[in-house]
Amino acid sequence: MRARDLGLACGKLPTGPRNTIADVAGVRVGHATVVEGDVCTGVTAIVPHDGDIFRDKLVAAADVLNGFGKSIGLMQVEELGQLETPILLTNTFSVPACANALIRNALQTNPEIGRWTTTVNPVVCECNDGYLSDIQAMLVTPTDAFMALGSAEEEFANGAVGAGAGMSCFGFKGGIGSASRVVALDKVAHTLGVLVLANFGRVGDLRLPDGRAPDPASVQVPEAGSVIVVVATDVPVDHRQLRRVIRRAGVGLARCGSFWGHGSGDVFVGFTTGNRVPHAAKSDLLPQRVVAEPKLDLLFQAVAEATQEAVLDALAGADTTEGRAGHRRPGLRHALKED
């Protein structure tokens, strides 16, 4: 189920045909879900294009709104403004396994990595799903990450799937959500898409677009989750402009009711398919296009709207879940039906 199936549309800009991050041409998403005993967790892969990402890098940026997190690869993304692997999402203790998979995946097609050329920068972002899942079991393996990468398609599931299997959001069952927006630049349609791993928000703080504040009747705990927002666009922007764009994802989170608490890791990663950086450049100067600065407002609006709806999409797609030690998170759609 999608957010709009529950009447939870938000914003004014039009959506892409799927209303997901995969509306950006070339972007695909895959999941591997690990459910065993007290474990409900997994891996979600965002693949930016079909080629060799190490050799055909994308202009990228990262922004940390609140840094209570253990993601890896963001330092180099910010220093070089480039993405050279797919992006993997998982639980906190599974970051090393996923990084291992990304490195091995790059080595399969580029055996010179770390020997005759540079090393590779794996990007893995995480949230703590320990309330519903036994995070200490550390059952996610590189094989699961390879499965997520190998299953990446334009059509993909939302809700309690992949990295979202054990996540919570505003006291409800959280997970994976996505949305997109279309903007016109020089009379040409461009797309911006967002995918979130929603595991944040204090119980009772959720605000729906129509002003409702549904009560999850859930355990009251401090705001101590996390959210990863992955932004993709085909608009040609540079690293600085892209960082300004993805920072506005915080607007979408705030519209949902978040105040970015002390214990929350709020991390944004973005890339554009509109500007590429070859690993082995054949010229000293590379062509890059940028957006006229005043027109960035369109992208600011797009990322705010898409982030808000992606969070609602994650909530809409997740069923009521009982996990570790009898912990329970109700599904939003079930709560809305009871109202």
Image (cartoon, rainbow, N blue to C red):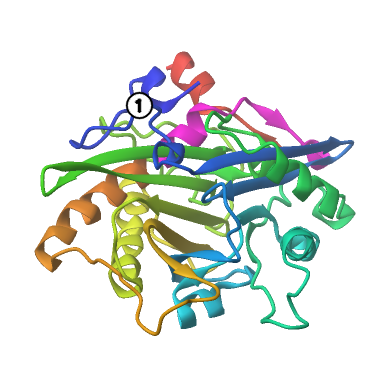
Q: Which quarter of the figure has residue 116? A: bottom right
The magenta span reads 309-326
Residue 315 is a magenta residue: yes
Q: Using the rendered view, name the quadrant where residue 171 is placed.
A: top right
Q: Residue at x 48, y 76 (%)?
A: 281
Q: Position of residue 234 (x, y in %)?
A: 34, 50
Q: Residue at x 49, y 38 (%)?
A: 177
Q: Please state, as top left, top right, bottom left or bottom right, where the C terminus lies in the image.
A: top left
**The one of 201 and 273 positioned closer to us in this rendering:** 273
Q: Relative to 290, is 308 on the left or the right?
A: right
- The single residue placed furthest to the top in the displayed view is 337
Q: Residues within 10 Å of mark 1 (few under 14, many from 20)?
A: few
In the image, residue 283 lies in the stretch drawn in magenta = no
Which x, y percent locates residue 145? Answer: 76, 49
Which SS type dominates the magenta stretch? helix
Q: Residue at x 62, y 68 (%)?
A: 71
Residue 140: tell me if it is visible. Answer: no
Q: Position of residue 194 (x, y in %)?
A: 41, 46
Q: Residue at x 61, y 43 (%)?
A: 219
Work out whether 141 lies above or below 339.
below
Whole-percent x, y for residue 313 in the image: 45, 33
From the image, tell me which residue sits under label 1.
17
